[in-house]
Amino acid sequence: MDIVLRALVAYAFIIFILRIVGRRELSSLGANDLVLLVVLGDLVQNGVTQSDDSVTGILLAISTFALLAVATSFITFKSRRAQRVIEGEPLILVQDGKPVEKNMRAERLTVDDVAEEARGQGIETLDEIKWCVLESSGSMSFIKQSG
């Protein structure tokens, strides 16, 4: 039972850390992000199983994480409020060609980051953008100005 409780705490902490790291970082992993995830995985394994190297302990820890992942998915499907807390909400980064500085600052994004993503989708300048939305997945969606 001790492994299950440690796995539960570790899972909640990982979700918390991933929300702090930010959506944009998760959608495009850099070298430091990759190191964070690899080290995080190793540290969690050590903390969850401690000195229990038995197959039963490992299966119990993995099963607990899998069950928590399914439960989290179910809860976010059923509850809009839980979805907002766990996954976040889409944010408007550009509206009518103008950057929304407050939202960009909150996600640690620059105008250059948005412009780079826009160019990747065939948009030359921010003036062509009616809406740029940072989705909860970390990707950016662009809607061009009409006309």
Image (cartoon, rainbow, N blue to C red):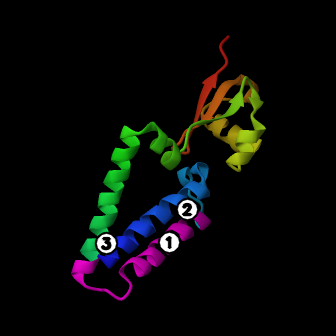
Whether 9 is drawn above or below 91: the answer is: below
Which quadrant would the N terminus be assigned to in this image?
bottom left
Q: Is residue 9 visible?
A: yes
Whether 10 is drawn above or below 124: the answer is: below
In the image, residue 19 lies at what x, y percent? 56, 54
How crowded is the residue under tag 1: few (<14 C-alpha within 10 Å), some, or many (20+)? some
* Residue position for label 1: 40
- Kindly check if marks 2 and 1 are in contact, taking CB atoms under 8 A apart as contact: yes
First in sequence: mark 1 vs mark 3: 1
Distance, label 2 to label 1, CA atoms, is 10 Å
Camera-side mark, 2 or 1: 2
In the image, residue 16 lies at what x, y percent? 53, 59
In the rendered view, does 34 fall on the left or right side of 122?
left
Whether 37 is drawn above or below 79: the answer is: below
* Residue position for label 2: 17
Asked if the magenta segment contains residue 47, the reply would be yes
Q: Secondary structure at mark 1?
A: helix
Amino acid type at mark 3: Ala
Question: At 46% across and 62% down in the image, what residue appears?
Answer: 12
Number of on-image labels:
3
Distance, label 1 to label 3, CA atoms, is 15 Å
* Residue position for label 3: 61
Amino acid type at mark 2: Ile
Amino acid type at mark 1: Leu
Question: At 31% across and 86% down in the image, what residue appears?
Answer: 52
The image quadrant of residue 101 is top right
In the rendered view, does 117 fall on the left or right side of 53?
right
In the image, residue 81 lies at what x, y percent? 48, 40
The image quadrant of residue 104 is top right
